[in-house]
Image (cartoon, rainbow, N blue to C red):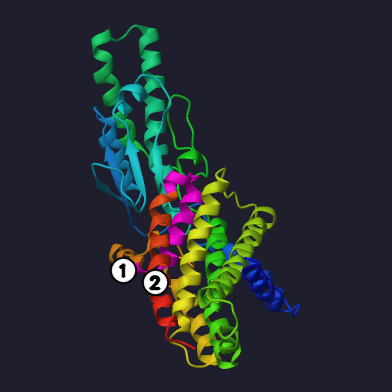
Amino acid sequence: MRKLLALIRNEFVREFDSPTSWVFFLLLPLVFTAAVGAGLGGAGGGTSEPQAFRTEIAVINEDAGALGEVLIESLRSHDLVPHLVSQWPEQGSALHIPPTFSEQLLGGETMSLEARILPVGTGPATEQMLRAAVGRLSGAVGVAQAVLADVRAAGLLALEQEADFVSQVLADTLDADVRPTVASELHWSGGVALGEASLVGATGTQQASAGQLVTWVQITLLGAAEVLVGERLMGTWKRMLITPTRRNTLLAGKLLARLGLGLAQMALLILGGIYLFGVNWGDNLGAVALVSLAFATATVSLGMLLATFMRTRSQANSTVVGLSMGMAALGGAWYPLEITPPLYQQIVRVLPSTWAMRAFTNLLARNADVLGVLPEVGVLFGFALLFVILGALRFQHID
């Protein structure tokens, strides 16, 4: 154990023997987080009118009355293309209309609709269109209720005639309705409310914080390949092998040191996201730690495997940087995977970065607990086991 700790300590000292190491370890990741977060936060937003495009939204309509269909027609009139589904989809924008929607709304109660909107890319425009469609229906219901109250006060209707009367007034109001100006917040007393709490998805800052963490930490962790290749080329590895220290202990020391560096970098970037950019990493710190450990273990194991294929240090360096950037870009670290085609989302599941981003997004956007990220954690540890086995087998033949 003493030898193992000495190896880890030496790797930490060597990593930070120059002040410039902190530039790549902490400063640049935070700078890129700020820049990317600002870019994603502004993408598709900043206007008060619906954008000139049509976008799909999945709709689960369980309403037993007629207003669910009316709302769907209102979606169409505001450039949304409703796609009727029977259950909550895994990806994309979605809206759920509950079974008692018509009954409660016509009864004067305030309804809250559950919706999921991706808050980057075309998400802000989709949200505005959805709010406009909901507002159109809610305003018409408010008019119908006001007219009904006046008619009741005058005694002009029998009780059994009220439902037909309200339906007729509602239809006339919607037919005569002019599209309302889109507002950032729409709420009518006795109408439909679409609250901020119902919007699910990573914000631009959350996406940037998790994405840049994955991008830069991958470089640190895959850097195990460059370290191991350098040791071999300088003859250090061969000299260590003739000492009483076992080969597996030497390899474990190198990998655990690199793993510790990656975990330390993740902790600093998470703290930077919290205190510099206001990113809320949720209440489940245990889940955050578990995902970080699984991602770090999988990536450093891949670095060990890569070292067995590299012949020069420059080759290892270019491979580490190129592979880190490529896996980050393809795995959703630079943009939300939700905006990509379904086939693409299936293909990139072969990358550890994809599963890491899925887990981090669940933590950030949905406040997932340990159980909520267990599938991603399991896959990441599976990657780690595969890479360790392959790397250890190949290292047995390397002197």
Taking 30 as reference, is 228 left or right? left
* Residue 234 falls left or right of residue 128: right
User: Residue 318: x, y in percent?
Assistant: 52, 87
Q: Residue at x 64, y 74 (%)?
A: 7
Q: Residue 1: horizontal and vertical position, in percent?
A: 62, 65
- Which secondary structure, mark 1? helix
Residue count near mark 2 (Cα–Cα under 10 Å), binned few <14, some 14–19, many ≥20: few
Q: Which mark is residue 3?
A: none
Q: Residue at x 27, y 25 (%)?
A: 167
Q: Is residue 30 above or below residue 178?
A: below
Question: For the residue carrying disc 1, how many other residues have a C-alpha within 10 Å: few (<14), some (14-19), or many (20+)?
Answer: few
Whether 360 is among the magenta residues is yes
Instruction: State the mark number for residue 389.
Output: 2
- Residue 66: give x, y in percent of width and height: 24, 30
Q: Main secondary structure of the magenta part?
A: helix
Where does residue 24 sit, x and y in percent of width and height? 65, 75
Label 2 to label 1, Cα distance in Å?
Answer: 24 Å
Q: Nearer the viewer, residue 16 or 138?
A: 16
> Which amino acid lies under the numbered mark 2 shown in the image of this protein?
Ile
> In the displayed structure, would residue 176 be above or below residue 182?
above
Q: Residue at x 57, y 86 (%)?
A: 242
* Viewer-side residue, 55 vs 76: 55
Which SS class for mark 2? helix
Q: Amino acid at mark 1?
A: Ile
Q: Residue furthest front?
A: 244
Looking at the rendered image, the disc whose residue lies closer to the viewer, 2 or 1, is: 2
Q: In the image, what residue occupies the spot 43% across and 26% down? A: 110
In the image, the segment drawn in magenta is 350-372
Nearest to the observer: residue 205 or residue 316: 316
Q: Which mark is residue 347?
A: 1
